Image: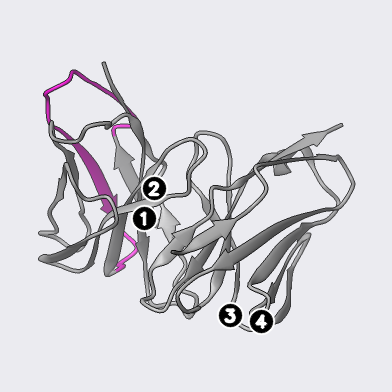
Amino acid sequence: GQNIDQPTEMTATEGAIVQINCTYQTSGFNGLFWYQQHAGEAPTFLSYNVLDGLEEKGRFSSFLSRSKGYSYLLLKELQMKDSASYLCAVKDSNYQLIWGAGTKLIIKP
Amino acid sequence: DGGITQSPKYLFRKEGQNVTLSCEQNLNHDAMYWYRQDPGQGLRLIYYSQIVNDFQKGDIAEGYSVSREKKESFPLTVTSAQKNPTAFYLCASSGLSHTGELFFGEGSRLTVL
């Protein structure tokens, strides 16, 4: 079966750095997405990786290793507004998205 | 502004009733999707449509129906056959960008009383 694993919950301090990991086992791979979702709201697109390596976008970076079936989202200079759930999703060989359950990130002052 | 509009945001339904959730987009996207989100689970695909007058079942289509008569609109009907309909429903669309990322509506929270 296809599976995406992420930690259920993480806690970090305002101003610090946090890394949210995502491991996947899917039938084929056509890209990996990270979305941010505030409670009760819609997910919003953060990043996309299809090749190995690091993609940087402001305070957020996303890394992919296809050989290891692994990605992480790195958030720097954490702000209170970064408190949200972070969803990892992989596009499989049929170009269907497989979603992880999400990681709830709690930022403390 | 371009975007996706879902309505209603909150909906209460008695058991045995059908209910229709609206989804309208003005992004000129061909593909539209309906997902269900439950606590502790990833998003699950109910139905998707890649072109007008055509749609496909997703992983959990039983008890749901859709139509795609216009490019802009993709309504979802939750029928009385859906055994556990209380959930957060998300509509999304995607265009021709190289990433194919999804744009989501604000969601509709359905509660069955």
**Which tag is nearer the camera, tag 4 or tag 2?**
4
> Which residue lies under the disc numbered 1?
B92
Considering every residue shown, the one lying at the far front of the view is A1
Q: Residue at x 49, y 70 (%)?
A: A26
Q: Are marks 1 and 3 on the same chain?
A: no
**Percent coordinates x, y for residue A50 in the rendering:** 58, 80
Residue position marked by numbered label 2 in the rendering: B105
Could you classify mark 3 by the number of other residues whose Cα lies within 10 Å: few (under 14), some (14-19), or many (20 or more)?
some
Q: What amino acid type is highlighted by mark number 1? A: Ala
- The stretch in magenta equals B8-29
Say whether marks 4 and 2 touch (CB < 8 Å): no
Question: At 19% across and 64% down in the image, what residue appears?
Answer: B56
Quarter of the rendering occupied by the N terminus of chain A: bottom left
Q: Are marks 4 and 2 on the same chain?
A: no
Q: Which mark is residue A50?
A: 3
Q: Are marks 2 and 1 on the same chain?
A: yes
User: For numbered disc 3, what is the local secondary structure?
Assistant: loop
Mark 2 vs 1: CB contact within 8 A: yes
Q: Are marks 2 and 3 in contact (CB under 8 Å)?
A: no
* Dots 1, 3 in contact, CB < 8 A: no
